[in-house]
Amino acid sequence: MIEVKVTSKWQVTILADLRRKCRIEEGSKVEIVEEDGRIVVKRKISIYDLAGSSADSGSVEELKRLLDGLRDEDAEKEPL
């Protein structure tokens, strides 16, 4: 278990060894969810994370679901 402090701006720091292990980089997106009274931080997987992965380990339906999620995120963004 790693203990961190919450700042006055309600921020926490993810320590470097854990960021490396979970492949969280600057600009990465994470999900914050509540599970059984705990706050859980989960790395969001993007289509770029799938590049080079074994094509036969996933299904077409899963890829479609991921693509639909990315399209929904893009649709929610304001135009430049």
Image (spheres, helix red, strand yellow):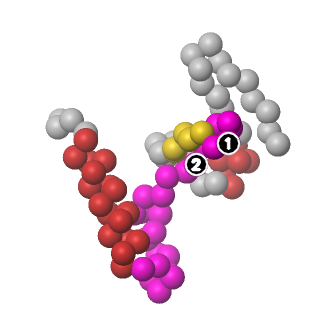
The kind of residue on which mark 1 rests is Asp
Q: Is residue 9 magenta?
A: no
Task: Name, please, the residue furthest toward the bottom.
Answer: 56
Residue 70: % across, % down:
32, 55
Residue 62 visible at all: yes
Q: Is residue 14 left or right of residue 29?
A: right
Q: Is residue 41 above or below residue 47?
A: above
Residue 5: % across, % down:
73, 24
Residue 78: % across, % down:
21, 35
Front: mark 1 or 2: 1
Q: Is residue 72 left or right of residue 44?
A: left
The residue indicated by pointer 1 is 36
Look at the numbered disc 2 and give the secondary structure of its residue: strand
- Rendering quarter of residue 2: top right
Q: Is residue 67 above or below residue 13?
A: below
Q: Nearer the viewer, residue 65 or 77?
A: 65
The residue indicated by pointer 2 is 42
Task: Identify the residue at image location x=35%, y=65%.
Answer: 65
Earlier-in-chain disc, 1 versus 2: 1
Residue 25: % across, % down:
55, 47
Q: Is residue 50 magenta?
A: yes
Look at the numbered disc 1 and give the secondary structure of its residue: loop
Task: Identify the residue at image location x=65%, y=47%.
Answer: 19
Q: Is residue 75 left or right of residue 37?
A: left
Dot 2: within a 10 Å radius of its alpha carbon, few (fewer than 14), some, or many (20 or more) residues?
few
Task: Name, please, the residue furthest toward the left.
Answer: 79
Which quarter of the rendering shows the C terminus?
A: top left
The range drawn in magenta is: 35-59
